[in-house]
Image (cartoon, rainbow, N blue to C red):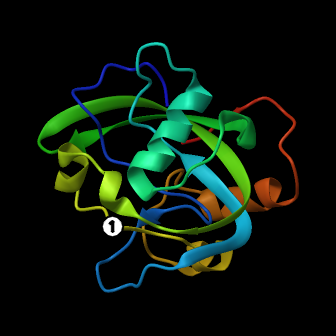
Amino acid sequence: MGPADRPGRGPRPGGAGAPARRPPHRPRRAARGRPVLVHARRGVEDGESLHQAAVRELEEEIGLLVGPADLEGPVWLRRHVGAFAGIDIDSRETFFVLRDVVHEVDPRGRTELELLGEEPHRWWSAAEIATSEEAFAPGDLADRLPELLAGPWTGPPRIVA
């Protein structure tokens, strides 16, 4: 998440144990006390820190209430260029880790533009990500997860693709 130029809010890929795009036929499930990769890339509002923006996005996108101090990181940084709702988006994304999450996804806070993305969310396990044919961000998410799952993030953020 960064102060990149953005015409409204762009799409959001997901992460490990985090809400991610899912085909409509897959059921939503609750996260059950596992680590979550927080990827809120809609943008930073005036006066917000990156942590505050991620917290706001978690509430808006999936109804999860946490505090900025609950987030580890940032752990990864990524630039993504792509189209959303017919608009080219050039976004700077920041990823955080949130541990021990127990939560049922509640997408009622999504904005009108977010609803255009038709991106239903659900929780994914690391094993599901590793065997899925779905696209995740970063593209090598399954390979990167073991480092995050091993324990608290203490290093600087890494650049991912």
Residue 147 in which image quadrant? bottom right
Q: Which amino acid lies under the numbered mark 1 shown in the image of this protein?
A: Pro
Measured as percent of width and height from the top left, residue 127 is found at 66, 79
In the rendered view, tell whether residue 2 sits above or below residue 153: above
Query: Which is more toward the observer, 34 or 79?
Result: 34
The quadrant in which the C terminus is found is top right
Q: Which residue is mark 1?
A: 120
On the question of residue 125 being in view, the answer is no
For residue 18, side relative to residue 117 (left or right): right
Q: How many marks?
A: 1
Query: Which is more toward the observer, 155 or 55?
Result: 55
In the rendered view, tell whether residue 12 sits above or below residue 156: below
Measured as percent of width and height from the top left, residue 92 is found at 46, 28
On the question of residue 43 being in view, the answer is yes
Measured as percent of width and height from the top left, residue 75 is found at 71, 39
Neighbor class of circle 1 (other Cα within 10 Å; few <14, some 14-19, many 20+) is: some
Residue 150 in which image quadrant? bottom right
Residue at (43%, 18%) from the top-left corner?
3
Residue at (48%, 42%) from the top-left corner?
40
Measured as percent of width and height from the top left, residue 138 is found at 54, 50
Residue at (17%, 53%) from the top-left corner?
116
For residue 113, side relative to residue 126 (left or right): left
Residue at (47%, 48%) from the top-left corner?
59
For residue 125, side relative to residue 86 (left or right): right
In the rendered view, tell whether residue 80 sits above or below residue 124: above
Residue 143 in which image quadrant? bottom right
